[in-house]
Amino acid sequence: MNLLPQDVLVMLKLALAAPQTWTYDRVAHELGLSPSMVHSAVRRATQARLFDGQLRRPRRKALEEFLVHGVKYAYPADLGPVTRGVPTALASPLLRDRFAHGDDAADIHVWPHPQGAARGVALSPLHRSVPSVAGRDETLYAALGLLDAIRIGRARERDLAATLLREVLDRAAP
């Protein structure tokens, strides 16, 4: 059984959530997924040893290793034309002030979304619900933006994004 991109979204959400407080229905609602999709994501992640079914929590070190070293290969980013969307990667909240961006839309990446606040090069999100989720969950948005920087960045950018992603996960750890 292979992991699907939405499994990464679910694992990130659960890694950032308070321990033992989540339900399949609530996670599904917050991520724009169905409860069965969340249940299947947890099942696949458990099988991949990214989730501890007894503790009902992602296995943080395994998840971190997969996010930093595996996601860019398992789910490579597709780039598209300049469009309106939600800033991600180097234009995401935790990275936008750390790297120089020009005024040109080709200098930033966005998840395509009609209500997006920026114009940039379209970058495919892990799941179609990600741009909407970003507006409702600031911490998850930050983590997903860092993950995109790991997916498409150069070595220095990937290293910084990985360090910041570890910090985000550490702050959320129980």
Image (cartoon, grey):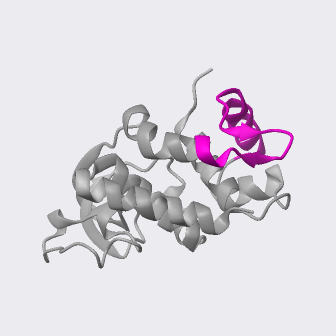
On the picture, is 51 further left or further right than 100?
A: right
Towards the viewer: 138 or 71: 71
On the picture, is 90 further left or further right than 148?
A: left
Give the number of callouts: 0
Q: Where 126 falls versus 161 (above or below)?
A: above
**Which image quarter is the C terminus in?**
bottom right
Instruction: Give x and y (percent) for residue 120.
Output: 24, 65
- Outermost residue on the top side: it is 1
Q: Which residues, given as a range, are shown in magenta?
A: 34-62
What is the quadrant of residue 86 in the picture? Answer: bottom left
Residue 131 appears in the rendering: no
Instruction: Give x and y (percent) for residue 109.
Output: 28, 61
Q: Is residue 58 magenta?
A: yes
Instruction: Give x and y (percent) for residue 6.
Output: 58, 43
Instruction: Give x and y (percent) for residue 77.
Output: 33, 43
Q: Residue at x 52, y 65 (%)?
A: 167
**Which image quarter is the N terminus in?**
top right
What is the quadrant of residue 96 in the picture? Answer: bottom left
Q: Where 106 falls versus 73 (above or below)?
A: below
Q: Residue at x 51, y 59 (%)?
A: 166
Q: Residue at x 64, y 29 (%)?
A: 48
Q: Where 140 falls versus 72 (above or below)?
A: below
Q: Is residue 171 magenta?
A: no
Residue 58 appears in the rendering: yes
Towards the viewer: 30 or 50: 50
